[in-house]
Image (cartoon, helix red, strand yellow):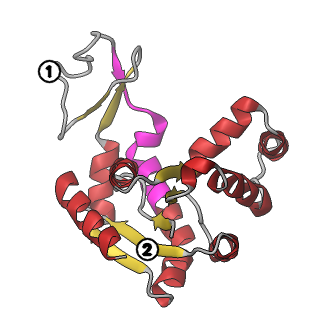
Amino acid sequence: MAKYIVLLGPPGAGKGTQADLIAEKFELQHVSTGDLFRENLKKMTDLGKLAQTFMSKGELVPDDVTIAMVRERLNRTDCKKGALLDGFPRTPSQADALADMLSEFKSKVNLVPYIFVPAEALIERLSGRWTCKTGGHVFHEKYNPPRMPGVCDLDGSELYQRDDDKAETVKNRIKVYNEQTTPLIEYYRSRNLLVEVDGTKSIDDVSKELISLVEKA
């Protein structure tokens, strides 16, 4: 039976890194809604054009459009062993839609790991990031500092801090994420699918824990 995992975690929790590692280990497709939107918009598919009509007006893309994109992606042959979902579902109603979709595939969500990191640690991780203006290389004040402050080690260009990485923006992103995701966390917890993983551990330790959880699931 195909395996479906919904990976949850706030910005800066290392979700993307772990998603790629777990997907490769278990031969699952890493299905990110961000990537799906970009793909549909770039190829100007019918769904991409539909999404664009809302985005161009500054409106949220309706659930049924997002769900249709996810359905089309999960129906592709490379997803026959299952998928690791990242960025979807975001709400209990989307989670219901996913459950209905998977039941049509005679499958279900097997596990929902939630990589938890305290807000203070997330702020330190994210607000310390500096990006190279020319090549987009990323450095961190604490974890990966450049040899010379403000200068990229790789091409010598100036480093700058993206608006997304500034402390106030980071705090707001985390607040919004927590407000939006709490109902979804409770949704999966009440169905005994949610497992909290300590995201303050090293990447390797988090990976080992996630691999163990997926194997048991």
Label 1: which secondary element = loop
Q: Which residue is drawn at 52% across and 70% down?
A: 181
| Residue 74 is at least partly visible in this image | yes
Q: Quadrant of residue 43?
A: top right
Q: Is 191 located above or below residue 16 in the figure?
A: below
Label 2: which secondary element = strand
The overriding secondary structure of the stretch rendered in magenta is helix
User: Which residue is more in the foreground, 109 or 55?
Assistant: 109
Q: Quadrant of residue 171?
A: bottom left
The residue labelled by disc 1 is 147
- Marks 1 and 2, how far apart at CA: 42 Å
Tell me residue 54's x, y (percent): 82, 47
Amino acid type for the residue under numbered disc 2: Leu
- Give, as a single range, the part of the protein colored magenta: 158-174
Q: Is residue 163 left or right of residue 63?
A: left
The residue labelled by disc 2 is 111
User: Which residue is more in the foreground, 112 or 74?
Assistant: 74
Q: Dot 1: within a 10 Å radius of its alpha carbon, few (fewer than 14), some, or many (20 or more) residues?
A: few
| Residue 202 is at least partly visible in this image | no
Q: Residue at x 78, y 33 (%)?
A: 44
The residue most toward the top is: 156
Tell me residue 161's x, y (percent): 39, 31
Tell me residue 85's x, y (percent): 52, 59
Q: Is 201 located above or below residue 14 in the figure?
A: below
